[in-house]
Amino acid sequence: MPTLTAPTDTPFLNHVRQALQRPAPLAVFEAGYLEHLALVNGSQRWDFDGLTLLTPPQVYPVAPASSSRLLIASFTALELDHPQPGQCLLDVGCGSGAIALAAARAGWQVAAGDIQAQCVEAARINAQLNGMSLDVRLSDLMAGFQGETFDVIIFNQPFYHLANAVAEDCVLADPGGSLHVRFLRAARHFLRPGGRVIFGFANCSNPNVLEQPGWELSLKVFRFEGNLNYLSGFFVGYPR
């Protein structure tokens, strides 16, 4: 079993940790899920934090409440703001490339991958729009990076693991969380000594996916939304 810890040991953070692992009724999430799905099915332009990003249909939109923006705003808390020279970061499931581009701007050597061809194309276009070069590959999780290792692997995973997900939705939903399980089982083989993973999670995710053996997991970033009904955040994991 992994060890779940919080930044500091306080009753409030323990409550947050427990809330993330306690499933809530489907009705709590369904309206928000469908609202976000409508954004995924549209074509948008986003300007934030000095980046211009285009998200065509079936590419995760970088909306104000998106987990991509939360992660980028949390670079300091996640210790991503001051990489050492030569440190490498892999963005798995990169979508629009927002996180990868923000990491490259912060000084990381960055590679990015996505299993969806439209996401790979969007990330490449967004790199060009922002005057940056980005190594983006078509890849099922880390499969396109065999033989390479990284100091940090980020997986801003599809949070929505509930059974009522739209069948064809692979941007927001991963019913049961099987994709996340595969990620944790494989990621250790792509980490350098001392390396870590950073992944998203929410209380509409399957808490059982956190039970993969051989990981020490720490909740570093979290937020409440929707009258405190929806809780999402980011874990940092080190292989043991």
Image (cartoon, rainbow, N blue to C red):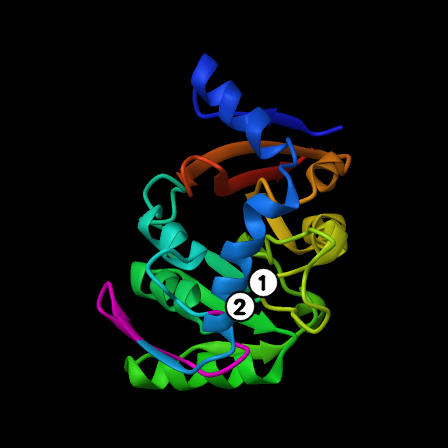
Report x, y in % for residue 8. Answer: 43, 19
Q: Is residue 199 visible?
A: no
Q: Is residue 232 visible?
A: yes
Dot in front, 2 or 1: 2
* Residue labelled with disc 2: 37
Residue 56's disc number = none
Alpha carbon separation for disc pair 2 and 1 = 7 Å
Residue 172's disc number = 1
Report x, y in % for residue 196. Answer: 56, 44
Report x, y in % for residue 26. Answer: 64, 46
Residue name at image x 51 percent, y 33 percent: 219
Nearer to me, 197 or 151? 197
Quarter of image, res 62:
bottom left
Relative to residue 215, is residue 44 drawn left or right? left
Residue name at image x 58 percent, y 62 percent: 172
Q: Amino acid at mark 1?
A: Leu
Relative to residue 167, is residue 116 drawn left or right? left
Residue name at image x 46 percent, y 79 percent: 123
Nearer to me, 87 or 157? 157
Task: Judge whether residue 51 is colored magenta.
Answer: yes
